Image (tube, grey):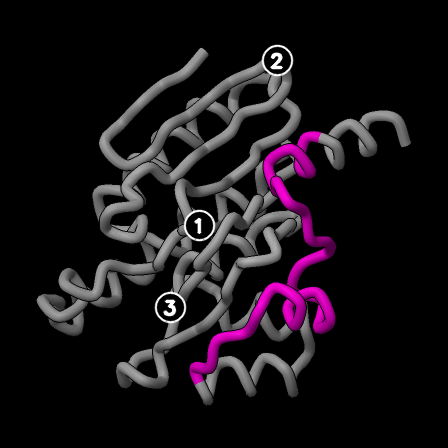
Amino acid sequence: MTTVSPAIVVEVNGPTAILRFANPQQRNPLSVATLKQLQTALKELTDRRALECFIFTGMADVFASGADIRELTNLDRAAAQEFSSFGQEVFRAIAEAPQLTIAAINGFCMGGALDLALACDIRIASSNATFAHPGARLGIITGWGGTQRLLRTIGRTAALDMLLTARRISAAEALRCGLVSRLADDPVDASFAIFQETRHS
């Protein structure tokens, strides 16, 4: 079964659901509208007991590009706090989902998209994937839990390096520092394989 919304395609196949960000022309931004669609999909899918695994991925060469900068520039202080809290709520739903959650990172994974991937149980990347927290270049900092989850995942030194320099790291470096657990030509296929491994372990 496949469900399509403007920014997300949900494909349910047996015990797995793929949530695919589907706006590659704009680099799959995690806009307010996209986050709302994601929240709605998560609420519906999490309650389905037959589902055991959620796989998050993108299209073309983009996983997702984080918050929509055009939206951020129009936020006042109160609206920015509300936007941050909303993103944290959505990603908390991923982190606390009873299903296994896997980020199948097929390309660029930037800012808030990296926060989303960090909320997942497992992260698999293609060899051309690229990661960054670019907020330091923009005079902002991620507000969706990434500062805490990144530190817990790769350690204080590596996390500060990413957050303070805003530099991009390759898939190979992400593997070395523990940001992802493995590389695969097709991270979605690899995610299915990992799910099957967990079922039989």
Which mark's residue is nearer the viewer, 2 or 3?
2
Instruction: Find disc 3 in the rendering and name its residue.
Output: 143
The image shows residue 28 at horizontal and vertical percentages of: 31, 48
Figure quadrant of the N terminus: top left
**Residue type, label 3:** Gly
Residue depicted at x 78% and y 27%: 196
| Range shown magenta | 166-192
Instruction: Find disc 2 in the rendering and name its residue.
Output: 14
In the image, is residue 66 above or below residue 139?
A: above
In the image, is residue 48 above or below residue 18?
A: above
Image-quadrant location for residue 78: bottom left
- Crowd tier of the residue under label 2, counting other residues whose Cα lies within 10 Å: few below 14, some 14–19, many 20 or above: few
Residue depicted at x 60% and y 20%: 51
Dot 3 falls on a residue whose secondary structure is loop
Figure quadrant of the C terminus: top right
**Residue type, label 1:** Phe
